[in-house]
Amino acid sequence: MLFFEKPFSTIEYNRALQCAVHVCRGYFLREEYHHSMRQCLNVLHQTGATSLIINMQAVRSEESWDTDWTGAEWFPRILRTDVRKIAIIVSPADLLRLRSRSAQIQVGEDLLCGRFFDTTGEAFRWIRFI
């Protein structure tokens, strides 16, 4: 089910997986990025999604993605949703530069697991089976 569609991103909900899928289509202006990420939070709250896939493959690694805002503002808000698994899809080159493919964060008694992938299929399989 499609919840959000703009030239720079889409957000859908996969009911079978209880998963929101946020696809970034390339370059964002800062305001567009913030708006898109807030819409993602809205979809998570509306649907009660327990997992999230963010596809960043179309984003060039040299682009500035406002990591301070994401870390300080957006990420703490996702901890207040039902999401416990986040799959982030990046380009193969970006995946090679990452120090680790996975991370875990304790949220109260729940565990939030995150993992980086370079293909959509791998991300969906991980969301489905882990």
Image (cartoon, grey):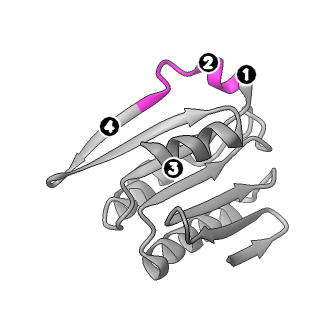
Residue 128 is tagged as 3
Element under disc 3:
helix
Q: Earlier in the sequence, mark 4 or mark 3?
A: 4
- Residue found at the very far left of the displayed protein: 109
Secondary element type, mark 2: helix
Q: On the image, numbered disc 4 is attached to which residue?
A: 104
Whether 99 is among the magenta residues is: yes
Q: Contact (CB < 8 A) between labels 2 and 1?
A: yes
Mark 2 neighbour density, 10 Å: few (under 14) some (14–19) many (20 or more): few
- Range shown magenta: 93-102
Q: CA distance from mark 4 to mark 2?
A: 19 Å
Of the residues shown, which amino acid type is indicated by label 4? Gln
Give how far across and how far down residue 20 sits, in percent: 56, 64
Tell me the CA gap for discs 1 and 3. 25 Å
The part of the image, by quadrant, that contains residue 93 is top right
Amino acid, disc 3 = Arg
Residue 68: where, in percent of width, then height?
Answer: 48, 47
Q: Which residue is mark 2?
A: 97
In the image, what residue type sits under mark 2? Arg
Q: Any mark on residue 93, and which?
A: 1
Residue drawn at 75 percent across, 41 percent down:
57
- Give the distance between the C-alpha atoms of the residues marked 3 and 2, in whole angstroms: 26 Å
Count all numbered tags in the image, as a single digit: 4
Q: Quadrant of the C terminus?
A: top left
